Amino acid sequence: MIVGAGKGKQYSNVLEKPLSKGKQEVSLSAFALLFSELVQYNQTQVDNIAELERRLEDAGYAVGARVLELLCHRDKGNRRETRLLGILSFVHSTVWKVLFGKVADSLEKGTEHEDEYMISEKELLVNRFISVPKDMGTFNCGAFAAGIVKGVLDGAGFPAVVTAHFVPVEGQLRPRTTILIKFAEEVKSFVIFFLNVLCNLNWVVFSHQLLQAAVSNEYRSSKCFLSSNGYFEEKRGWDNVRLSFFIIFLKTSWHEERRYSKIGTFSLLSILTVSSTYQLLHMLPINFCTR
Amino acid sequence: MQFFGGSDISPSPPNPSGSGNNSKNNNSGGGGNMMYVFNRNGVCLLYREWNRPLRTLSSQQDHKLMFGLLFSLKSFTAKMDPTNVDKGNLGVPQLPGQGCSFHSFKTNTYKLTFMESPSGIKIILVTNPRIADLRDSLKYIYNLYVEYVVKNPLYSPGTPIRDSFRLKPRGVEELRCAWRLPFRDLLGEQ
Amino acid sequence: MAPLAPRSGDAVFANVERVNAELFTLTYGAIVRQLLTDLEEVDEVNKQLDLMGYNIGIRLVDEFLAKSNVSRCVNFKETAEVIAKVGFKMFLGVTASVTNWDVDGTSCSLILEDNPLVDFVELPDTCQGLYYCNILSGVIRGALEMVSMKTEVTWLRDMLRGDDAYELRLKLLKQVPEEYPYKDDE
């Protein structure tokens, strides 16, 4: 008897298989039980809560990194966000919707620190069935979701420290889960952003947009300015950082635009060399390697 | 007042319209005396009591005795089944689901209601003898067990259910509204 | 009377809460990846996946019983059908077919055409011995053990290894009656 003819088609390699549209579903309990086992297994591999959370974060990271690739390829025509707020809202809405079936409850900017953002969820999917015994301290399964967020952000070129916390809600027995995102120091440097742009988009098209954007009102109204020698002085605020980059880009490539009109990754290296007064060059190989 | 009275109990939490009576009901003990949950290996996963003035045994002996009572009773009731040919031998254990099964018995002082899932989870409620059919309530408790115990990533199957939580199960609120009776501490409510 | 076992899990699946299969697939991938890093040997990973499946199975059975309205199965044949039609559907949203019964009715094949675990997966050269979906066999073994059936579940065909379907061989070893768990020492 021949069974399996028809639907179960064979592909000689995974790339030939058409990418699923992402509409297929499994039951929540199947996921809950799988996730439980992930937690149970990792409990046997660690001797403290911090380590357990780190391992869950690792597992989540693997998911996040793949989700980013998948969604950028399938839903965004191979483009991905290059702006900080863009990527944050991508996580908060697109990623959340695909993975957890809904947009996250809120995305807020930290009040105390400029570079902190919070995604909050009243009942995070992975915390849905959890009850934490007293002896497990502050353990939070949300570390898995934090890992996913970290995976997405890292993959998009915005390295961050991401942690999950329970935050009590007044009048509610169960706390909500807040995912705290603290961007790494180097996100502020233009190199990351620069490379981000470079690895992400068709350069010719982008350079044109970039020039337009840089002279648009949006940025002109910003408080940032350049001192005569080209160092940017106003450092506060993300937009300013972005602006600084634009201006540096302008300065370094303005007169060389013709030469680099078909710029590729390699020739961009020389642009950066031009701007070596900013001492960015030493960071370059590291960042290229991680691409 | 009867907590388990009449149509008030159903497998889905009833509308908590009467929860205004909460304070009145909290201390009276109501119709419930004890509840046990056993797994197939005879481990008592959960024991709760609300009204048990007389206790002579250690809890370990008590659990063993209760489990033994059910075990033999099941075997006896199946053996006496007048409608079934396949009765097995008395004392020889049956496969779960095999033969008939009892669901409650009554004495002049208490009533015991019993449910067993094919996976061997046994839920026992000991209550006031005047109480109506509780099988739906047991099914409801089984569903709670599945939802809040089985799927809790931090629960290791086969171990007694913890009753002190830093983060309480999601069901506590639901339970408190639904049952407004001694069951409020079912899942670790203080 | 016990309610009749539903013939298909469609209705149950439609009524339970669901999540995107990609979250499930990628999470499973992350687990396998973690095991490969932790254990290094592919054989060890196969064993661990089976064990994790078993652990899931002993939990999953209660979820299955509580939600599916299946109360008991007359024999192993019906059990296998229920797993294929109701169990797989209810949890993974796919169905399997049951074929190739032996004469005693104690072993059969479950054939899966659609398998949400393997989306995006290709076995690298270093992992050719890996039974990527080994967790499934463990789940079935664990769940059946909780309803007193000791079984052996093995993979016969695996599309990741170049076969044309996923085929699990299910063999009933024995039915274990529930035993009185305490030793008579007091």
Image (spheres, coloured by chain):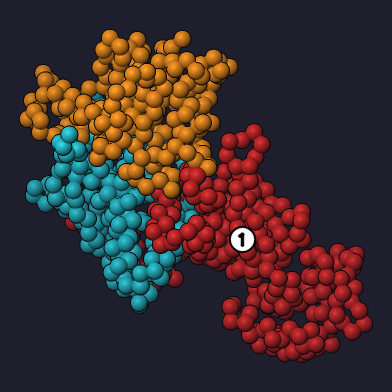
Chain colours: A red, B orange, C cyan
Where residue A168 appears, as percent x and y from the top left, is 63, 42
Q: Name the residue under label 1.
A: A162
> Does B85 sit left or right of A249 as displayed?
left
Where residue B143 appears, as percent x and y from the top left, is 39, 33
- Residue drawn at (13%, 20%) of the image: B81
> Does A133 sit left or right of A173 as displayed?
left
Could you say which is closer to the camera, residue C92 or residue A147? A147
Dot 1 crowding, Cα within 10 Å, few <14, some 14–19, many 20+: many
- Residue drawn at (37%, 18%) of the image: B53
Q: Is residue A181 above or below residue C172?
A: below
Could you say which is closer to the camera, residue A175 or residue C43? A175
Q: Is residue B72 above or below residue C153?
A: above
- Residue drawn at (30%, 57%) of the image: C51
Quadrant in which residue B82 is drawn: top left
Q: What element carries label 1?
A: strand
* Direction right: furthest residue: A228
Q: In this view, does B57 lie above or below A201?
A: above
Can residue B17 be seen here? The reply is: no
- Residue drawn at (74%, 71%) of the image: A188
Chain designation of label 1: A
Q: How many labels does the image show?
A: 1
Considering the image in quadrants, where does the N terminus of chain A appear? bottom left
Callout 1, which amino acid? Val
Could you say which is closer to the camera, residue B188 or residue B117? B188
Where residue C14 appears, as percent x and y from the top left, is 43, 39
Considering the image in quadrants, where does the C terminus of chain A appear? bottom right
